[in-house]
Structures are given as structure tokens and as C-alpha cells.
Image (spheres, rainbow, N blue to C red):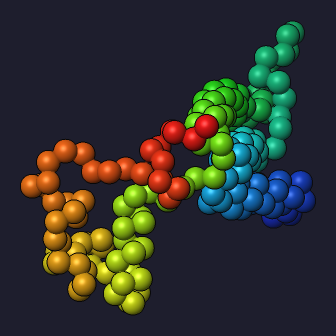
Amino acid sequence: MTGAVDNTVNTLDVTMAVVVGGLFTIGFHLMLQRSLMRIVLGFILLGHGTNMLLLVAGGTPGLPPVLEGRPVDPAEPADPLPQAMALTSIIITFGLTAFLMALAYRSWRLSGSDEVRDDVEDRRIDIALQRAGADEVSGPSGAPGGPGPDDGGGPGDEDDDEGGGAPDRRDDDGTAPGDHR
């Protein structure tokens, strides 16, 4: 029977697809953690998952693109584009991983911890939420973090332009950022 389509599923492709899904899932989970090393490891796993996805998308392997001494049917050789994209992805992932590790090391040297701390704005919104006792605090324009019901926007507010000078930026322990020795 000529012209019949082969509908069998290649178990290697299914296995690779499951592994790619697992790498993406674990990578995203690690990137959502507070530890910088876990974020870097999650980024590395995402890079590996992307490389495997490119190789799976390349389809079944074929003949080498160049064969000496015999003519090659254009439908027989393997597509070199997914392999070239995977190689490019490996190089980009390596460079970004080195950069992220340098940033994580610098952050650890400055603060003594690899935990990502809350932003000042996040803390202000959290305090406003606790004060209001509501699930969401919205300002007059509907934007989260605006003046809440108990927040009159009085003196000392971060949005106050009349105070002059820079706001006091201190860590939880009362020291200036980067002053941990």
C-alpha cells in the first residue's frame, strides 16, 4: 500500500518530551525560590530543557548533510538548523549563567546571604494590607499600593515631594544597605 501514513508514536520522542516538560517544571519552580543559587540552578535547567526541546523539534535523525562520492536526496539528510540553534543556545546559556553566578556571588559578599529580600515598595504594600485588613489595597486610581483607607498620605510618606532629601533607606536591623560586616 503506497502513500500510507505511518501513525506510530516513537517512544523516544515521547520520553524526550516528558523529560523536557520535567526540566521546564523544575526550572521554573527553582526560579521562583528566594535563594539566588536556586534561581541560577533553575535558569540552568531551563537552558538544558530548551536545548532538548530544540533537538526533539528537529525530528528523526537522517543522513549526514554531506556524503562524499554519492548524490544525496534532499529529503534524506538531517536538518542542521535545530542543531545550530541548540549550539547557539548552549553558548548563550553558558554566558548568562556565568553572569548570574557573578551577580549571586557579589550579592552574597555584600549581604552575607543569598536570599532575595523584599523590595521597599513590597514591604510598604504589605504594611498597608495588614493595616487595612483587606485582601487588596488600591489607591484612588485603582493602582495597588496607593493611599489606603488608613493612609492619609501624611508627612514622611515616600510619595511626599515636600520633605526634601532622600528617604531613609535602612535594612531590618537598622543598618544602611551594604553595611553588613
* Image height of 80 relative to 118, above or below: above
Quadrant of the snapshot with the N terminus? bottom right
Give me the residue at 84% from left, 29% from top: 63
Q: Residue furthest bottom?
A: 133
The image quadrant of residue 82 is top right
Name the foreground residue: 38 vs 69: 38
Q: Is residue 21 left or right of residue 139?
A: right
Q: Is residue 52 left or right of residue 89?
A: right
Give me the residue at 41% from left, 64% from top: 122
The image quadrant of residue 147 is bottom left
Can residue 6 be seen?
Answer: no
Q: How many marks?
A: 0
Q: Is residue 19 left or right of residue 124?
A: right
Quadrant of the snapshot with the C terminus? top right
Give me the residue at 16% from left, 71% from top: 154
Image location (x, y in percent) of residue 67: 84, 16
Name the foreground residue: 44 vs 125: 125
Q: Residue furthest left?
A: 162
Name the foreground residue: 179 vs 23: 179
Give me the residue at 77% from left, 22% from top: 65
Q: Residue furthest right?
A: 11
* Image height of 40 relative to 122, above or below: above
Can residue 179 be seen?
Answer: yes
Image location (x, y in percent) of residue 143: 25, 72
Image location (x, y in percent) of residue 35: 67, 53
Q: Is residue 45 left or right of residue 13?
A: left
Image location (x, y in percent) of residue 39: 66, 49
